[in-house]
Image (cartoon, grey):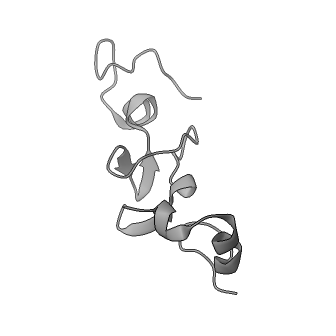
Amino acid sequence: LPKSTCCARSVPQLTQLLSVAAEKVTSLGKDWHRPCLRCEKCNKTLTSGGHAEHDGKPYCNHPCYAALFGPKGFGRGGAESHTFK
């Protein structure tokens, strides 16, 4: 069975789960199912155009992208209270 380009579900399985036409979003140069477009770090569901990208992967703007890839140091980027280990 053919697989989705954004997840490991088969196309017939997805058709049964949701109306793909209503749930399709385009981001990072490919089509996603709305529930599959998630932050790589915190797994929060994202909106098309309402997130950041690093190395082809989606991240929420705050706090994940800012904390992981933004300026470092006190008072920079507004994410100094968020650190990931």
Taking 14 as reference, is 35 left or right?
A: left
Say which residue appears at 35% left-offset and 67% top-offset.
Answer: 29
Viewer-side residue, 64 vs 26: 26
Taking 50 as reference, is 38 left or right?
A: right
User: Above or below — where is 40 with respect to 77?
Assistant: below
Viewer-side residue, 55 vs 21: 21
Residue found at the very far bottom of the displayed protein: 1
Q: Quadrant of the C terminus?
A: top right
Judge whether residue 9 can be spotted in this image: no
Q: Quadrant of the N terminus?
A: bottom right
User: Above or below — where is 83 with respect to 58?
Assistant: above
Judge whether residue 36 can be spotted in this image: yes
Residue 28 in picture, x, y percent from top left: 36, 61
Taking 16 as reference, is 78 left or right?
A: left
Q: Using the rendered view, name the quadrant where residue 61 is placed.
A: top left
The total number of labels drawn is 0
Taking 13 as reference, is 85 left or right?
A: left
Say which residue appears at 51% left-offset and 56% top-offset.
Answer: 34
Residue 59 in picture, x, y percent from top left: 44, 44
User: Above or below — where is 29 with respect to 69?
Assistant: below
User: Above or below — where is 59 with respect to 33?
Assistant: above
Say which residue appears at 51% left-offset and 23% top-offset.
Answer: 83
Q: Using the rendered view, name the quadrant where residue 11 is placed.
A: bottom right
